[in-house]
Amino acid sequence: MSDREKKIVEYDFPRKSRNFNLVGFLSFFVIFATIGTILLYNSRAAGNDSLSLSPASGSYIYGGTVTLTVNEDSSDAINAVEADLTYNSTQLQFTSASCSSTFGITAQNTGGSGAVELACGIADGSVTGAQTVGTVSFTVIGGSSSSVITFASTSAIIDQSTDTNNWNGVTTGGTYTLASAPTSSITSPSGGALIHTNCMSISASSSDAVGLTKVEFLVNGGLYATDTTGSLTSLSFAWNTLSGYPNGTYSLTTKAFNGAGLSTTSSPISVKVNNGDINGDGNVTISDLSAMATNWGKTYGTVGTCSGSQTTFADGDLNEDNEVNITDLSILASNWGTSD
């Protein structure tokens, strides 16, 4: 190879090298730009705008109405929102859905079978930031549990300038406590019972999924006693029939209350009171006087009251002051000859 040929090779080599580096740079730029475009598109497709329900929680009673506001919060100008909701149709019954005054165009406002579709638009305009899209209402048809409402994946927040969905895809809506009324019943005495003791124990049973707060005992619909402590599911009330309840027939009920503010009154039972009927045969006669005479002057032990710890007294202690004396004879005499 001549000296001239060597010089040409030496000259051309770096030129070819420079051309190769330029092609590599351009290739890298194209790849980088393509990746960046994809990332930007995906970021845009994911969206930053959000949907929410208010309130997002709360307690509702059986038969009550759950009214929720659908809200959107957008960082860009938007002109249409589709809020699709899913709910438990065994707990909630769809009532209505409507768009707000901001979104004056209603495309869809239907619901049922566990799904709601609310599509609202703005005529010749757009909004940015937090806005009320509309309201959705349900009726509670099942209680004693939590009910979850979520946004379906078909929901959308549409950018006015690009017509793309800017919703961030977060489906969280709200969780709501549904409460049913408690139950209550009188377990003792039974209906038609004869009450010949002046301190009658009334037993009641109540239950509730949310939690009992109090139980009342009522005589002829009037409040006689209230219990708010201890085991409210099973309790007893001491009814002093000498305190304004002369011989006759009475209707007894209990009323239970729960933490959701609901209450239930038990089915009534009818009982007969016959004060002075010491032996419980349904009549105030010489037999009762004989029982009283047998225990005349006796005391039972520690003094108690009908509403206190002692509810059993000596035969003939009609006023239950823990002694059989002239006061008891007066009560028996006042009821002499009465029968059921």
Image: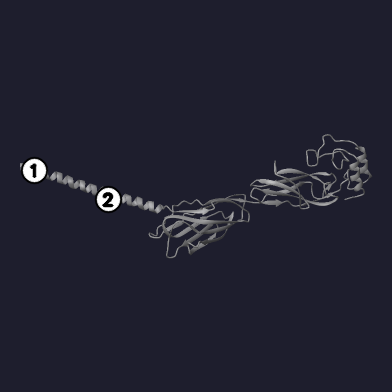
Residue type, numbered disc 2: Val
Placement of 300 over or under 110, stated as above or below: above
Q: Residue at x 71, y 47 (%)?
A: 215
In terms of secondary structure, where does tag 1 sit?
Answer: helix
> In the rendered image of this protein, does residue 43 appear above or below residue 104?
above
Q: In the image shown, does 254 or 104 lie closer to the viewer?
A: 104
Q: On the rendered structure, is 240 left or right of 151?
A: right
Q: CA distance from mark 1 to mark 2?
A: 36 Å
Residue 331: image quadrant is top right
Q: Residue furthest right?
A: 286
Tell me how many marks there are: 2
* Label 2 Cα crowd, 10 Å radius (few <14 / some 14-19 / many 20+): few
Task: Look at the image and tell me whether residue 335 can be seen.
Answer: no
Chain-order first, disc 1 or disc 2: 1
**What type is the residue that disc 1 sits on?**
Lys
Residue drawn at point x = 46 percent, y = 59 percent: 81
Left or right for 251, reference 101:
right
Write down the residue under mark 1: 7
What's the colour scheme? Answer: one colour
In the image, taking residue 11 as reference, residue 230 lies left or right, namely: right
Residue 135 place in picture, x, y as percent? 53, 59
Element at badge 2?
A: helix
Residue 51 drawn above or below residue 234: below
Q: Which residue is mark 2?
A: 30
Within-10-Å neighbours for mark 1: few <14, some 14–19, many 20+: few
Give the position of the N terminus as an image quadrant: top left
Where residue 248 sits in the image (x, y, percent)? 85, 51
Instruction: Tell me where residue 51 appears, x and y as whole percent.
Output: 47, 54
Residue 323 position within the rendered picture, expressed as x and y whole percent measured from the top left: 87, 38
Q: Nearer the viewer, residue 62 or 55?
A: 55
